[in-house]
Amino acid sequence: MRGAGPSDRGSHMAAPKQSPEHVALGESVRAIRLRARLSQEALHARAGLHRNYIGAIERGEINPTYRVLLALAGGLDVRVSDLIRLTEERLRRNGHHV
């Protein structure tokens, strides 16, 4: 799975536009990555996802599959549930119903 991009991780659907949910997820991934003092390149090495793909997730441009979330969480050394919880907190702070 190393170096895998979206085509290697199963089907995915690109978000038709940057939805609040995708943006919040991307912000959560970026916040955890920066807190861990990881570059996108370092996360690529740990998660097996292409650096550009990670960047697209962080910008809210990608609707990642569960397998991609597992890879991200593993690379960030957090649980998927922690990633989702942080995303939901961001959405609530911005006035979105979760």
Image: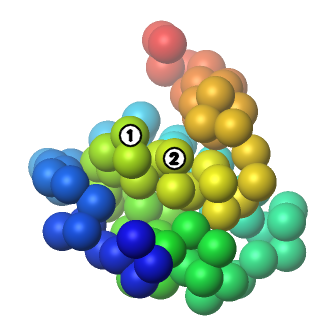
Q: Kindly give the residue lying farthest to the top in the view shown.
A: 97
The amino acid at mark 2 is Leu
Residue 39 vs 63, above or below: the answer is: below
Mark 2: secondary structure: helix
Q: Is residue 86 left or right of residue 60?
A: right
> What residue is rendered at 15% in x and 52% in y?
11
Q: Is residue 42 left or right of residue 50?
A: right
Instruction: Locate residue 15, reporting x and y percent.
Output: 21, 49
The reply to whether residue 86 is in sight is: no
The reply to whether residue 74 is in sight is: yes
Instruction: Locate residue 96, reporting x and y percent.
Output: 49, 20
Q: CA distance from mark 2 to mark 1?
A: 6 Å
Residue 38 bears which disc, if any?
none
Q: Kindly give the residue lying farthest to the bottom in the view shown.
A: 41
Residue under circle 1?
A: 66
* Proximity of marks 2 and 1: CB atoms separated by less than 8 Å: yes
> What residue is rendered at 55% in x and 79% in y?
44
In the picture, the quarter occupied by the N terminus is bottom left
**Which class describes the residues within 10 Å of circle 2: few (<14), some (14-19), or many (20+)?**
some
Residue 70 bears which disc, if any?
2
